[in-house]
């Protein structure tokens, strides 16, 4: 029988959660931006630096062999985490942004032609817009957007209509970093494939919170970032189907991605190394592997359950105050939402909200959240506040956030309407 989810036991693994801010215990509600790190990840990185710091794939000495083994073991862990089938499908990048750019610069350059259409949704992070804008400009292609229904869900009828125009690529987020909306990735991928499109999924916000099975989804590409799922920054994953990665050209050249080099030409290393030029982020890979092991021990299904419980509790508390505007799926659609709740307080700029929250020891995000088209055009605000949760948060911290809202209203004399 699986043990009960003990958030207090989990919290003991995160040293930063004992920090005080302005004399109050830290309440960290910005995990959608970056997650905190458990001591197991911190120790794994520290142990690498202390006991076997060395380069990989070259040294014929013990600590280099160990570093190589641990780095490559992290790839195996990542492959299993995503059910990728083989570590050959796991390319390490800097983050999801880097993963998407790699696809745009390699697959995109080879496959997008003048007049082709690239399709994305209106809820995308800039990382899943800007690389395609640049590619479309270079190739004289079109970039089109699928609209949203009720300001919170992908409009499936609009998606069907735009897929009917035969886009070459469909790129979409698995979970919105602003709205917290969970998109039906498998269904959307199947629709795109029927239209003949290649599919890329931005999994930055999904992979930390739920079980991801890339073979079940069926997408050609899937990206995630270590730093959003308890691991270090500076390392991410591009999952790609092997046959596509084999056919793609590398976009950076140098050490470790080559098989041979002459004065006239070079040949490339096998997958996944042909996309990883130069000395890799060895400590990042090792730390990422430790993060995956931690997530596996807790259990992704239990993390999902806890996150959804917090989402429902927070939506209920926020819904009790008519001066608060919540965006995206509400309590009636809470099962289609995870991770993040965007909100505004009537007549108060989000930056002021975040500043007063900080005075109460509560860390939230305020701004356009690297999704300006969504926030400014569809939500219709210059900025929104966002609280986001992860496996170490608990209901008492939601209560602290609600108390901070009362402080905002008191300081700025906001009246409920």
Image: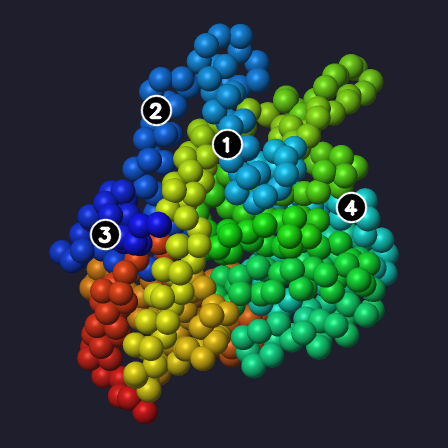
Q: Residue 38: x percent and y percent?
A: 32, 41
User: Which residue has dot 4 on it?
Assistant: 109
Q: Earlier in the sequence, mark 2 or mark 1?
A: 2
At x 36% / y 66%, what residue is drawn?
A: 309
Q: Residue 63: x percent and y percent?
A: 44, 13
Q: CA distance from mark 3 to mark 2?
A: 26 Å
Q: Nearer the viewer, residue 162 or 209?
A: 209
Residue 92 seen in render:
yes
- Nearest to the eye among marks 3 and 2: give it: 3
| Image-quadrant location for residue 286 | top left
Residue furthest to the front: 1
Which class describes the residues within 10 Å of circle 1: few (<14), some (14-19), or many (20+)?
Answer: many
Q: Are marks 3 and 1 in contact (CB under 8 Å)?
A: no
Q: CA distance from mark 1 to mark 4?
A: 30 Å
Which class describes the residues within 10 Å of circle 2: few (<14), some (14-19), or many (20+)?
Answer: some
Q: Earlier in the sequence, mark 3 or mark 2?
A: 3
Residue furthest to the left: 23
**Side of 122 relative to 397 (left or right):** right
Q: Are marks 3 and 2 in contact (CB under 8 Å)?
A: no
Q: Secondary structure at mark 4?
A: helix
User: Which residue has dot 3 on it?
Assistant: 8
Q: Secondary structure at mark 2?
A: helix
Q: CA distance from mark 4 to mark 2?
A: 41 Å
- Nearest to the eye among marks 1 and 4: give it: 1
At x 77% / y 22%, what residue is drawn?
A: 267
User: Which residue has dot 2 on it?
Assistant: 47
């Amino acid at each position: 029988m699986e043990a009960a989810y003990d958030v207090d036991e989990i919290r003991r693994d995160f040293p930063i959660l004992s920090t005080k801010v302005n004399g109050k215990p830290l309440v960290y509600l910005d995990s959608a931006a970056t997650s905190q790190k458990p001591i197991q990840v911190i120790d794994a990185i520290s142990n690498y630096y202390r006991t076997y710091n060395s380069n990989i794939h070259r040294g014929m000495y013990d600590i280099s062999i160990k570093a190589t083994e641990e780095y490559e073991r992290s790839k195996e862990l990542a492959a299993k985490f995503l059910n990728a089938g083989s570590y050959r499908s796991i390319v390490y990048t800097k983050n999801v942004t880097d993963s998407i750019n790699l696809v745009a610069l390699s697959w995109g350059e080879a496959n997008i032609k003048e007049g082709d259409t690239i399709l994305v949704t209106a809820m995308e992070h800039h990382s899943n817009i800007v690389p395609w804008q640049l590619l479309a400009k270079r190739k004289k292609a079109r970039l089109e957007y699928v609209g949203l229904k009720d300001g919170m869900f992908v409009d499936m009828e609009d998606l069907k209509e735009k897929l009917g125009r035969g886009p070459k690529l469909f790129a979409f987020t698995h979970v919105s970093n602003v709205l917290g909306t969970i998109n039906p990735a498998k269904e959307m991928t199947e629709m795109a494939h029927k239209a003949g499109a290649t599919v890329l999924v931005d999994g930055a916000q999904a992979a930390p919170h739920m079980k991801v099975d890339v073979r079940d989804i069926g997408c050609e590409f899937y990206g995630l970032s270590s730093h959003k799922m308890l691991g270090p920054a500076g390392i991410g994953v591009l999952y790609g189907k092997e046959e596509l990665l084999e056919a793609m050209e590398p976009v950076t050249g140098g050490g470790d991605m080559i098989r041979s080099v002459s004065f006239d030409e070079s040949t490339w290393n096998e997958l996944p190394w042909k996309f990883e030029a130069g000395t890799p982020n060895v400590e990042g890979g090792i730390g990422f592997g430790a993060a995956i092991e931690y997530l596996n021990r807790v259990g992704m299904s239990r993390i999902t359950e806890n996150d959804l419980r917090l989402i429902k509790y927070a939506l209920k508390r926020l819904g009790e105050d008519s001066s608060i505007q919540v965006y995206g799926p509400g309590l009636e659609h809470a099962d289609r939402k995870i991770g993040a709740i965007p909100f505004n307080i009537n007549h108060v700029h989000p930056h002021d909200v975040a500043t007063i929250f900080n005075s109460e020891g509560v860390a939230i995000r305020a701004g356009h959240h690297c999704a300006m088209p969504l926030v400014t055009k569809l939500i219709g605000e210059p900025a929104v506040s966002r609280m986001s949760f992860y496996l170490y948060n608990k209901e008492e911290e939601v209560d602290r956030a609600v108390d901070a809202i009362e402080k905002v209203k008191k300081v700025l004399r906001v009246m409920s309407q």
